[in-house]
Image (cartoon, grey):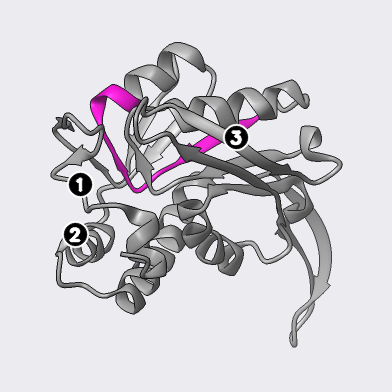
Amino acid sequence: MSEVHLISHPMVQHKLSIMRQKETGSKDFRQLLKEISLLMGYEITRNLPLTEVEIETPISPMKAYRVLGRKLAIVPILRAGLGMVDGLLDLVPVAKVGHIGLYRNETTHEPVVYYCKLPEDIQDRLVIVTDPMLATGGSSCDALDMLKERGCNNIKLMCLVAAPEGIAKVQEKHPDVDIYVAAIDERLNENAYIVPGLGDAGDRIFGTK
């Protein structure tokens, strides 16, 4: 069974509370999401491999360590997942970025795939899939299916807010994928939105509603 990592750092929770407020505008929402993504990135990249290198300080030569950044890929689920990419790139600027395009059918609440573009060597990388909202889990499971079909076997899912139903579905379908979240909310409503949630993350990021 995959692990669920709840990142309860005070600054993450503080920024998330501001994001949840309905009066928070798109500009502040985007900035806060970027900041939270960077903070969450510290935890999700905790076990990135290091390589030993020789460097020279102003005082003397020494052995030091650097992250093998070329072994990381960030794959946002469009469109809302884009809002989490810049924070992670601030942390690991040399990571490659792929894109998976999914939208939710408003009648069936099931995800529909419309785009997929990934780095050629995606199967050799630690892949971080980003999507602010883990609601039903349908979009995340479809994205994880697509990555595994391309040979990926080292994947982590990074979300901002999750519903218990979404977590359960990902754990059932993809027990090898750890989930990183800033909050686990109460439930889904009749329209499959997270309660209390923060509304439609894509609309709030891009100001489309």
Q: Which residue is mark 1?
A: 197
- Residue 159 rendering spot, x and y as whole percentages: 40, 44
For marks 3 and 2, the one nearer the N-term is 2
Residue type beneath disc 1: Gly
Horizontal side of residue 106 vs 189, given as left or right: right
Assess whether residue 158 is covered by the magenta stretch.
yes
- Residue 115 rendering spot, x and y as whole percentages: 67, 43
- In the displayed structure, 139 sits above or below 86; it is above
Judge by depth and name the residue closer to the eye, 63 or 49: 49
Q: Residue at x 15, y 72 (%)?
A: 23
**Are discs 1 and 2 less than 8 Å apart at CB?**
yes
The secondary structure type at the circle numbered 1 is: loop
Q: Which residue is mark 3?
A: 113
Assess whether residue 184 is covered by the magenta stretch.
no
Judge by depth and name the residue closer to the eye, 34 or 1: 34
Q: Which residues are magenta?
A: 153-166
- Residue 116 rendering spot, x and y as whole percentages: 70, 41
Q: Residue at x 54, y 18 (%)?
A: 176
